[in-house]
Image (cartoon, rainbow, N blue to C red):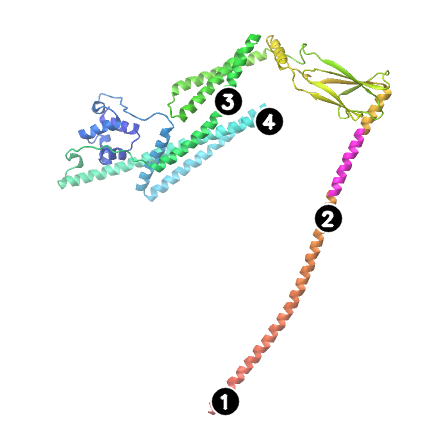
Amino acid sequence: MKFSEKLQTLRKDNKLSQEQLADMLDVSRQAVSKWESGQTYPEMDKLLAMTKIFGCSLDDLTNDDIKDIRGNTKNKSTAGNLVDEVLEIINRTCAIFKKLKPLDLVKIIFAMLIVVIVLLLCHIPVNYIYSLGVEVFMNFGFKIGDILSSIFKFILEVAYFILSLLIFVYIYKIRVLDHYEQINTTEDNYKEDKEVDNSKKNNHIEKETLPKREVIVKKEKSYTIFKLLGSMVMACIKFFVICLAIPFVISLLLQFAALIISILIIFKGVFFLGIIIGILSLILLNIIILNLIFNFLFNKTNSVKRLFIMFAVSIAALGIGVGITMWDFTNMNYINGVPEEIEKEKYEVTYPMKNDIIIDPYNSYINYAIDESLENSIRIEISSYENYSHYYVEYNDGKYIYFNQDTSMHSIKDFVDITLKYLSKKQLYLYEGLYDGDITVYTSSKNREVLLNNIKNYLSEKEQSYYSNQIKQYQEVISDYEKRLNELENSYYANINSLKQKKQYLEEKSEKLEEENENLRLQIEEYKNTIAEYRDALSNLLENS
């Protein structure tokens, strides 16, 4: 590799412009441009200064047999370099825009505006992808589908924004920065060649042929304001990333808990290989995401190859786990109902028969059975799964009998043990009817008719009371509206009377004004006549004198 190629490579790897390198070497930018194009060769003191700047040896820099040279480049993919890259683009933009003509500036704005329009049009397929995702997520139910759709939309919008920003910056760098820097370099080289020719004619010495002097490596200009703003923006981004990491940390803890449970139930005879593989793959995915977040927060480098391999393995394992799990549950024997180990328990209560007694009028699942021996009493028999659906009776005011249900599970361990027992046999009970209960009321046929009539009359009274209250409420609303209407009418007529009075007052005042105007006109005529008489008298006096 030639020296000119090495110099250009080292300069770009260290993110230096030709002007910045020239400033550090105390030479002109045109001199650096000629070194990179191979037109001239730097002096020894410049070469030694370059070794300090690039962190390489003199042999690495000048030996054409050495092809791979990198020096102390700063190409680590860390969050800290983001600010430097943004500042570099801003500096290059400011330097170019100072030299641009108004016409070139208009061309750049027009070209980048077209790029923005094209990127906005690219948002149409993003909306289409989102609509397809919504259709898929809604199959999981409205609430879950809504949550998944919101997350999916957030991910799509962020990905679209980042990708659009990267495309815009890349096109701007290629189409504007690199293009106009090349044009400016060509023009400057032409001007310098012309100046050198003129200086040779005038016997002047080139700058590069002057006596050697000590080279002082200048530090790059520090833009404190931009650095501060960049640091503030980066701090906000990192805070957002930390908030984003919290759900993944919680998810990782839950996945480890699920993995431990999956391992423990193996000792109960239940082994689902697909679920264990799926949980391990999700744990690996979480670790990858948290690793990326950690490296971003602490400016650590990412091993792209290692992360890609881990991601590919986790995705493949997740697919395998889902496939095995679906196969296991496809071959499962599904049974409606409740296992035999869970038995219904019965208990009964007896109450004296009264002519006004009412039994839970809003419960339509009560069965009435005839027992003629119960002429003066009522026997209520309840059958339910006590540990899962406990019914209890309330007898209020010696008149109302109500049935309440407690569906809290009193023995979770027994439920889990029974479920795991049948899962080990590839059987899965759906527990249909677990919370149902059978309520039967035994009494004589005569009492049965009384009870049903009491319920009918009670519901009729409640219905009448409900409609009466509704009518009363509507009547109150109507009365309120009528009152407001009367107030509005009174106000209207009051305003009308007020306007009539104002109209009458204005008419009277108008008549007075017309009279005053007429009097004034008459006075003006009198004054005019008097002035005419005075003028005639004055004229006569002048003539007689």
Viewer-proximal residue, 189 or 509?
509
Earlier residue among tags 4 and 1 = 4
Report the residue marked by disc 1: 540
- How many angstroms separate mark 2 from mark 3 (CA)? 61 Å
Q: Are marks 4 and 1 in contact (CB under 8 Å)?
A: no
Q: Residues within 10 Å of mark 2 (few under 14, many from 20)?
A: few
Could you tell which of marks 1 and 2 lies nearer the N-terminus? 2
Q: Secondary structure at mark 3?
A: helix
Residue at numbered disc 3: 250
Residue 347: name its quadrant: top right
Nearer to us in this view, 541 or 512: 512
Q: Are marks 4 and 2 in contact (CB under 8 Å)?
A: no
What residue is shown at x 61% (from left), y 75% (from top)? 519
Label 3 near label 2: C-beta < 8 Å? no
Name the front one of labels 1 and 2.
2
The alpha-carbon separation of the residues under discs 4 and 3 comes to 24 Å
Crowding at dot 1, Cα within 10 Å, few <14 / some 14-19 / many 20+, comes out as: few
